[in-house]
Image (cartoon, rainbow, N blue to C red):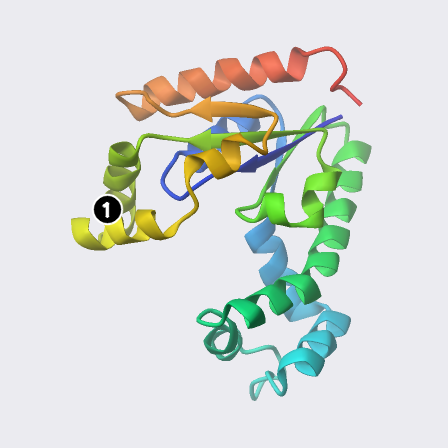
Amino acid sequence: MTIVGITGPSGAGKTTALSEIKKLGGAVIDCDAVYHQILEENCNLQDSLEQAFGPLRNQRGIIDRKRLGHIVFHNPEQLERLNTVVGRFITEAVGNRIDKCRRQGYRLAAIDASGLLESPLKELCHTTVAVVAPPEIRLQRIMAREGISEDYARARISSQKPDSYYTSQCDHTLVNDCDTMQAFEQKAGVFFTWLLRTDGWNK
């Protein structure tokens, strides 16, 4: 089974690329969804977070994500600490999902993770793909998707890592320079079909 890590900046078209993997019969593992699930269900993770950051459970006994967010998101050191604590739990959970996909007979599985390159998740992948796009395309996509102003969207883009961060560390680059979403869907479909057929990746 081929395991592909997908990453890239916001608004580049990762969701569209992942939809093409599904059309090819592949499985998509959304690491944000995995994180939210284990945050609610994994008692060991909950205990580890409270050991690191203090009381975090709400009245229902689950981790208050907003409370945790206030602690880490404006503090780079605390955010790095959070990533360290959470990293091994997410990697284990994603590994379990990959094993399940393999047992179910999938030939292709994609790991969707914005922080893929900074985490142990990268080691689970046979190959990695950076999905990037020109700034103006990203700008229009972010504005349409989130209903925000152009100035705010530009600020979001400027605060993120440059394309070179992703392209220099990934095995492949998929550039969304298409005029329409349909054209990019076709381009992504051709790319992943080729990747799936590439000798050496069907493990």
Give how far across and how far down residue 155 sits, in percent: 27, 53
The reply to whether residue 149 is visible in this rendering is no
Q: Residue tagged by mark 1?
A: 143
- The answer to which image quadrant residue 63 occupies is bottom right
Taking 25 as reference, is 72 above or below it? below
Q: Position of residue 168 (x, y in %)?
A: 54, 31
Secondary element at image label 1:
helix
Q: How crowded is mark 1: few (under 14 residues within 10 Å), some or many (20 or more)?
A: some
Q: How many numbered markers are drawn?
A: 1
The one nearer the camera, 103 or 50, is 50
Left of 1 or right of it: where is 159? left
Q: In this view, does 7 lie above or below 129?
A: below
Asked which quadrant contains residue 109, the reply is: top right
What residue appears at the point 54 percent right and 78 percent down from the top-left corner?
Answer: 64
Q: In which quarter of the image is the C terminus?
A: top right
In the rendered image, which quarter is residue 15 located in?
top left
- The x, y position of residue 112, in whole percent, is 57, 41
Residue at image location 66% in from the left, 50% down from the top: 119
Side (left or right) of 115 relative to 142: right
User: Which residue is drawn at the image coordinates 47% and 69% (left, top)?
Assistant: 73
Please state, as top left, top right, bottom left or bottom right, where the N terminus lies in the image: top right
Q: Residue at x 23, y 46 (%)?
A: 143
- Name which residue type carries label 1: Met
- Residue 116 in sight: yes
15 relative to 73, above or below: above
On screen, residue 189 versus residue 179, left or right, reads right
